[in-house]
Structure formats: C-alpha cells, structure tokens
Image: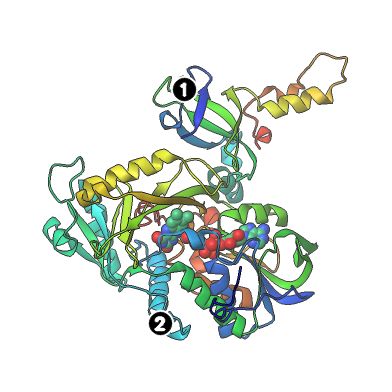
Amino acid sequence: MSTEHLPEHPEFLWRNPDPKKSYDAVIVGGGGHGLATAYFLAKNHGMRNIAILEKGWLAGGNMARNTTIIRSNYLWDESAAMYEHSLKLWEILPEELEYDFLFSQRGVMNLAHTLGDVRESVRRVGANQLNGVDAEWLDPKQVKELCPILNINDNIRYPVMGATYQPRAGIAKHDHVAWAFARKCDEMGVDIIQNCEVTGFVKDGNKVTGVKTTRGTINTEKVGLCAAGYTSVLAEMAGFRIPIQSHPLQALVSELHEPVHPTVVMSNHVHVYVSQAHKGELVMGAGVDSYNGYGQRGSFHVIEEQMAAAVELFPIFARAHVLRTWGGVVDTTMDASPIVGATPVENMFVNCGWGTGGFKGTPAAGLTFAHTIATGSPHALNKPFGMERFETGALIDEHGAAAVAH
Amino acid sequence: MLLFTCPNCGPRNETEFHYGGQAHVAYPANPAELSDREWAEYLFYRENTRGLFAERWVHSAGCRKWFNMVRDTVSYDVKAVYRIGELRPETLERAAAATAPDQPQQLAPAQANPNNASEGV
Ligand SMILES: Cc1cc2nc3c(=O)[nH]c(=O)nc-3n(C[C@H](O)[C@H](O)[C@H](O)COP(=O)(O)OP(=O)(O)OC[C@H]3O[C@@H](n4cnc5c(N)ncnc54)[C@H](O)[C@@H]3O)c2cc1C
Ligand SMILES: [Zn+2]
C-alpha cells in the first residue's frame, strides 16, 4: 500500500523517553491526576527531574472513561473549598496550558424527586452560597425553562420536584485535558514513561528509595501514587493498608444527534445523568456496580435501569440507540471523599479515593498533591483529606453531593 | 448479568442479590479495649483484593439469607459458594494439605470458629 498520499504526521505532544536510573520524584499512574501532579511539581515547585510511570498508555484508565462532569456544589466546607478551587483552575487552565480542551460551562442540574431530596438540595444550595459556590434552587417550571426536553409532568414514577443548579459547572474534553497537561509536562522536562508497570518498591527500613518496574528498577527520592482504582494493589506492595474499595463504574453514549440538550442533568434518585457531548452523542452514566471489581466492566442490568430512567425523564430519547458502553475501576471511600496526603511509608504519598467523581478534581488534586510531595506536608486545601481522618473520626461525608456517581 | 448459585435456592440472576462486602470480618472480641486505629480498621478498612475475594451476598429477592462466595474480582468468575458460618474453602484445602496424606482430613481446633477474623482474605 502506498503511503505517498498520507499527510505528514502531526507534531508529537510529548517524547517517549526510556526511564533514567534515578529521579527526584516518581509519580505512579499517568491518568489525569498523575499528569496534573507532575505539572504542578514542575511548574510550582521547580521539580523537573521527575517521571510519570504508566502501566498502559497515557490516560487510558478512568481519565479516558469518565463522563467529564465538572462542578463544585459539594456540601461540606472542606469539599467546597477543594472542588471550588478546582473549578477556578479549570477556568484558567485552557489559557495556562495553551490548549483549548473545550471546557463548556453549560451548567449542571441535580434533580430532586422526593421531599427528602428537596430538603437535602435546598440545604446544599444554602451551604454552597455561604461558601461562595454559585448555586441556585429551581422549581420545576424553571427546570423546564433551562432544559425544555425534560419531562416535568406528574405521569412518571418520580416526578421532578425541583433541582439545584450550578451555572459555572459543565463538561470538558477529557482526552484533550490529558494531552494538554502531558505537553506542558514534557516541555518542562518531565519524563512520561508509558508501558511501564510498577511491580514493587525498594525500601530502606520504612523509607521508600526506589520503584521496581517492568522496565527495570528506578531510584527515587519520593513516590506519589496516582493509581485510582489500583491504589490498593500498590499499597499492598508498599506494605500498608488503605481504606478504599474498587468498583466497576460504567457509562455509555448514543449515536450523534442534533443539539437538543443544553445543560447537564443528574438524578440521584432515579440513577441516571445525561449530557450531550460537543460532537452530539448523548453521554449517560449511573451508579457503580455494587460488587468489588477490577474488570473494567460491569453488569448489563445497570445500563438497562439507567436507560429506563433516562427515557422517563427525557421522552425524546426513546428512539436513540446505545452505541458504546464501557467501564472503569473507581476507588471509593466510606465517606465519598478523596484521600490526599502522607502514607505510613516515609517519602511515599497517596492521592486516591476520588471514586466516581475525580475528573472535576484533577487540577486541585494535582496542585495540592504536588505541594504535599514537594514540601512533605499538606496544602491547606488537602489537610482535612488525609487518611488519618478514618481514625480521628473527622470524616467528610459527601454521599449526598457525590450524587448518582460522577 | 451475573448468575449466582444461592446455597438454598440454586442459580438466580444477580439482580436478586445484594452485596455485603468482605466476608469473615469478625466483631471485635473486646470492643471497649480497641484503640482508635483498631476501630478505624474494623469500621473502614476492608481488603480490596485484585483476584480471589471472599465476600458476603444476601439473596434479598429469594430466601433472604446471607451466604459467602469466593469470586475473582478481575474475571468475575464465582469459584465457591458456602454458607455463613462455614470456612472459606481454600482454608479447608490448606488445612487438608497440611495433614499427612494417610490421615483423614481434620481441622485444627483454632479453625473451628468460622467468624475468626484471621480467616479473612
Ligand atoms: C464511567 C466513569 C464516569 C466518570 N464520570 C466522571 C464525571 O463525570 N466527572 C468526574 O469528575 N469524574 C468522573 N469519573 C471519575 C474520574 O474518571 C476519576 O476519579 C479520575 O479519572 C481518577 O483520576 P485519574 O485520571 O488519575 O485516574 P486514571 O486515569 O484511572 O489513572 C490511574 C492510572 O494509574 C495507572 N496504574 C495503575 N496501576 C499501575 C502500576 N502498577 N504501575 C503504573 N501505572 C499504574 C493506570 O493504568 C491508570 O492509567 C468517572 C469515572 C468513570 C469510570
Ligand atoms: Zn436463596
């Protein structure tokens, strides 16, 4: 076959270097969080002799599988501070990274279908407003004005009784976010090493001094774990326990449609959330599969149930088709909040537990985790999110705001 | 949809069951004496095994009884189903292998308590 008619290959966004013998810091996991962490280590802390080790291909884990919802309307002060800081970073990152990853602030609506939902939602709107997070309570008529294709009639099992609305929330293109960070990391000298699985750690007493990989042993001063659903596997290699459970989380898309859906709609109660991607696919997700699973796939009944809920809420979708479904492995915690901080192993730090909703947290996770790794102590934003909260009891219970998943 | 075999009712769809997480987590023997760390371990720390995992399920839309299952968390294959109060099958096999081949299979007395936390995965 002749290749003479093919256009030039576009410029590569990052090099593919071989691992060096040693680094000042090694980040395990080349998803969004690993990339953002390396970016802020290099940019804010001047650490350039660092590497990201990724067992597969760059951002092929949850970063490639999420439904890209970005919002900051979480209940508690600690979470509102973290997620709102993240949202503010999202607002400036396209310029800072010189990459338009199509962050579209089209708003996110969280529907209420029961009196309990209404009370919880109104309370959360109040809490958000006190924390400087843009939040509104909408009655069903206002819901309909913002999203005309939503069914607000009484003829469904759980009619819409209102919604919280965050106008600054929205969606972005996840792959482009990863590539944007990767390019900047690479420019600053960070080695992004794909197909390099971490298989163990080298320790001197309780101090980590290196990582064993499928591409040889690499010495390092510090290790930052950004392995999402695989964190427990790495923690076990390192010799400590971490209170997370890995679950399958699925999503799906329809074929392309004309723009019909102007915002993002999530329903905690009937278990579905929907947005329409820039290209036109309807993007839908629901909750995790109940069982622990590392299979990057879940059970079909979860999809069936979310489709039933979607068609009740959006009768116009009844003739749409499911084109693709997929799953990721999400790292859930008992309080639905992330873990960002130190580990029992000296010089090893962990960022995980973002579960079903860590895409939105990517910039803040990177910023605070980089601070934690570089300085050895947490940033003010991630201080409450250390693992020790499970001992002190200072949990940050976000099961309400963490919503259906995402 | 996974197919699970309830020890009482036989093979049924996954949707008839509810998940109960890691099996063989015993209630602390002396709760009043636990340190904060030990309470954290009991309440919040569970194994998150990649591979064979012993877990609890309840057949909520059937006999409504709890039972245990060993399932591969990567392939989702079910390797064993056994009743609450019984030991995890590999534990029995290990015990059997430890006894001399010409002796009948016997359990050491320490393994008689099925809820012993040390029998967890
Ligand atoms: C279906 C789905 C929908 C979602 N929707 C949303 C949403 O709408 N909004 C939102 O905010 N969040 C959402 N999330 C959650 C979000 O995707 C995650 O919280 C976030 O991506 C986790 O951070 P990450 O990008 O670094 O993870 P990942 O991309 O999973 O990165 C972890 C990386 O570590 C690598 N790794 C693991 N073990 C090793 C090893 N031993 N050696 C080397 N590398 C290793 C993996 O290969 C992987 O690339 C969703 C998740 C899923 C699955
Ligand atoms: Zn039964």
Quadrant that contains the C terminus of chain B? top right
Residue nearer the viewer, A113 or A396: A113
Amino acid type, mark 1: Lys
Asked if residue A383 is positioned above or below residue A111 in the image, the reply reads: below
Amino acid type, mark 2: Ile
Using the numbered discs, state the Cα–Cα distance from disc 1 to disc 2 in whole angstroms: 54 Å
Q: Nearer the viewer, mark 1 or mark 2?
A: 2
Q: Quick check: is the Cβ at mark 1 less than 8 Å away from ligand 2?
A: yes
Left or right: A237, with A360 as reference point: right
The x and y percentages for residue A296 are 54, 49
The x and y percentages for residue A326 are 47, 51
Q: Which residue is found at the position 60% from the left and 40% from the top?
A: B75
Residue nearer the viewer, A100 or A107: A100
Identify the subunit bearing mark 2.
A
Q: Mark 2: few, some, or many residues within 10 Å (few <14, many ≥20)? A: few
Q: How many marks can you see?
A: 2
Identify the residue at the far front of this view. Answer: A2
The x and y percentages for residue A270 are 29, 45
Residue that carries the numbered disc 1 in the rendered image: B65
Describe the element under mark 1 as helix, strand or loop: loop
Identify the subunit bearing mark 1.
B
Asked if residue A172 is positioned above or below residue A290 in the image, the reply reads: below
Q: Which of the 4 image quarters holds residue A397?
A: bottom left
Q: Mark 1: few, some, or many residues within 10 Å (few <14, many ≥20)? A: some
The x and y percentages for residue A55 are 66, 61
Q: Which residue is found at the position 70% from the left and 76% from the top?
A: A17
Residue that carries the numbered disc 2 in the rendered image: A92
Q: Quick check: is the Cβ at mark 2 less than 8 Å away from ligand 1?
A: no
Left or right: A376, with B92 as reference point: left
